[in-house]
Image: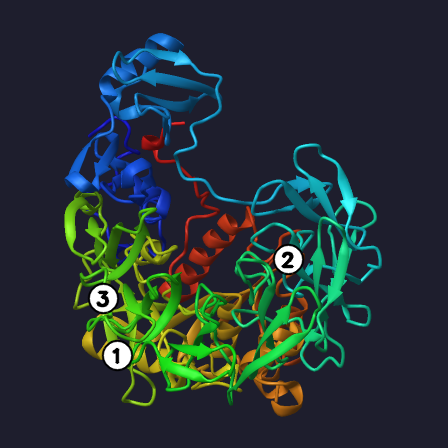
Amino acid sequence: MNKFLLGAIPLVCALAANAQQNNALTTKDYERAESMLSYGTEPYIDHAGVRPNWIAGDKFWYRVLTANGSEFIVVDPAKKARLAAFDQARLAASLSTATGKQYTAAMLPFRSFNFSDDDKAIIFKVDEQQWKCDLGSYNVTKDNSKPSGNGNTTGGGRRRGGSLEVLSPDGTKGAYIKDWNLWIRDIASGKSSQLTTDGIKNYGYATDNAGWTSSDGAVLRWSPDSKKIATFKDDQREVGDMYLVSTNVGHPTLKAWKYPLPGDKVIPMIERVIIEVDNPKVIKLKVPADPHRASLSDDIASSGTFDDVDWSEDGTKLAFVSTSRDHKIEKFRIADAATGDVHEVFEESVPTQYESGWGSINWKFLPKTNEIIWFSERDNWGHLYLYDAATGKVKNQITKGDWVVTQVLKVDEKKRQITFIADGTDAKNPYFGHYFRIGFDGKHLTALTPGEGNHQASFSPSDNYLVDTYSQPDVPAVTVLRDANGKQLVELEKTDVSRLESAGWHAPIAFSVKAHDGKTDIYGVLFTPPNADPNKKYPIIDYIYPGPQGGSVGSWSFAASRGDCVALSQLGFVVVEIEGTSNPLRSKSFHDMSYGNMAENTLPDQVAGIRQLAAKYSYIDTTRVGIWGHSGGGFATACAMFRYPDFFKVGISESGNHDNRNYEDDWGERYDGLANNSNYEAQANEVYAKNLKGKLMLAHGLMDNNVPSQNTMLVIDALEKANKDYDLVVFPNAAHGYGAGSVYMMRRRWDYFVKNLLGVDPPKEYQLKFKADPRNGQ
């Protein structure tokens, strides 16, 4: 075995089921399980994770890990050539001489490099020192020049005075918040000047606060010419506060911030403005204030910038979408950037809640032709429509069929083409995403990523080529180079898991079953113990995330560990993830099945699915069913234990939003409706806590600014009043994800299921030990 590998994992795993006879699992059992966490599996996976770094002429390079270390590959699409980027042995020898340290070809101590401008040398960094290697002589010297600019670069912000600067498109200016006003800084001189003067506490410009997420970063959108800023003045003055208190020696610190709740009379309202930068002037758009809402999610900056705003190229017009408080009404508007006059173009109203896409906002303003590309689920599927921006009328439907446009990636106005990702076109699984191109007129639909599986692609700068990686939950990835029409040119890498399989890993089972209605197909992934004995019975653990904006499975691409699903299966459990009805990425009617009643939590589908799997796989024991989840999954877990107490026997509920009257307004009001139209109390977990029969562990971070811990305290209060036993794990100063405490939580989760569902004792206070993949160098 190669010297860089982690300690050997037993080739023949002793089943955890055998340990039941001894009424205990051992440290070795836990070590075997831990070896199936991502840091244990990744060192045994070869030829995976291709990330192309595009360089001149549509060429690209990437680094790939192999059984012998790492390799750097350069690809020339025009020649269909895949070659070593450089002679690694010669570079390692030269670098060893230059640094006085010993390096091997497979263990070069850097992960990335840049070609010099003349492509005759590479520039890389080792031990914080930049080096240059001449590719003719392989002479390595220290390099003090700036890194080459032909690698990948991305825009971003810079920290200044505790706030996040948003850089202008030309890179000469940075906008930031100071004292509730918007300021501008000249990058070259460092000089700052004030753009607005009337901002006051809780009524300031560009503030980022959606209740559950808040920062000092400014929410705004620069015009393409860097002369104007689109933003808003956010009125939160009468909005209710949320409070968190630190745990420490001495006086605690009180954290208070604006956090509206469903049913509140007052929520944050944004007054839209355009700010001229060179000669500061604030132009108020002539529309009433909008609720602090966005079409994509419950954060107005979830796309990474000011959501639902689109400038014309010349900066004279600003298109934007206003979202109603309950997400039922979307208004498309176009503002005159000079006067603030607003043209009402069209309105879309839906009975439940409007989606603009998943992962990206799928509408686009086309000022050159005065058109709009709009996303709608009006025919029960998420599709694109072409509108006339002058009349507000539909010119034609662009995409159609029983599938969903999830993300619009590029709109080419000159060619009148759209590149996008769609789910539902793969016959095997409707969640597999594929890439397509289509004309504005709805013609010439071109599949860019054939091949069964879930695809992730990177396009060359010219869009003439794409690097396509595709896989399935049970099928490792293949990465290929394709031309602009999807034709495969070169197979770049095929993921090899043979060493991982030799170390005791085996692939999960991808499946489909019927939903609780007995007719709708739903999909999931099943993880089984090693060498599962069909004559034995194994308890099953249901990992749940009910959405409605996501689902239990998450990505449908290959992942060896799947969180700790595989690790738990190594301890003697069957583990399942089921994507239920009311999760997204299917039809509108599918997603809306539980609209107005989030407390359904996909649980009828979970129960129906587990029963069907048990009928197919006799080793599944439906008398021993566990369930766990975090956040929305914590809500669903407690709900399962209270409403299905005879089916679910052991539950671990982490950071659950147990009563959506105590969670931020936009979540509940989007998926349940406004409080006066929906019975929030009937969906609250504490109301049903008296039904608990099994073993329940609750966990929460006391500094959780997403789901405040009062949610779990309400459940605790109800359990105690009902004289019910429960277990509790508290992280005094942790936020929603527990931070460093997540490792402790994982171990406690394993222990709880082992003791209460498997029926044996766990090793006492096992310590999980993270190990990095040695192939990654420094």
Residue in the picture at 60% in, 77% down: 323
Q: Front-most of 569 and 585?
A: 585
Quarter of the image with the C terminus in it: top left
Task: Inspect the image, locate mark 2, and give the three-letter code of the amino acid beneath it.
Answer: Leu
Residue in the picture at 75% in, 47% down: 248
Residue in the picture at 43% in, 32% down: 149
Left or right: where 207 falls relative to 21: right
Quarter of the image with the N terminus in it: top left
Q: Which residue is mark 2?
A: 220
Task: Inspect the image, locate mark 1, and give the three-letter code of the amino acid beneath it.
Answer: Val
CA–CA distance between discs 3 and 2?
A: 35 Å
Left or right: where 114 falls relative to 454: right
Q: Front-most of 78 and 718?
A: 78
Dot 2: within a 10 Å radius of its alpha carbon, few (fewer than 14), some, or many (20 or more) residues?
many
Q: Which mark is residue 513?
A: 1
Q: Going from the N terminus, do you reach mark 1 or mark 3 first?
A: 3
Residue at disc 1, secondary structure = strand
Left or right: where 427 falls relative to 361: left
Q: Which residue is mark 3?
A: 446
The answer to whether any part of residue 299 appears in the image is no
Can you tell which quarter of the image residue 706 is in?
Answer: bottom right
Can you tell which quarter of the image residue 550 is in?
Answer: bottom left
Q: How is the image coloured?
A: rainbow
Q: Do the CB atoms of the residues marked 1 and 3 lie less than 8 Å apart? A: no
Residue at disc 3, secondary structure = strand
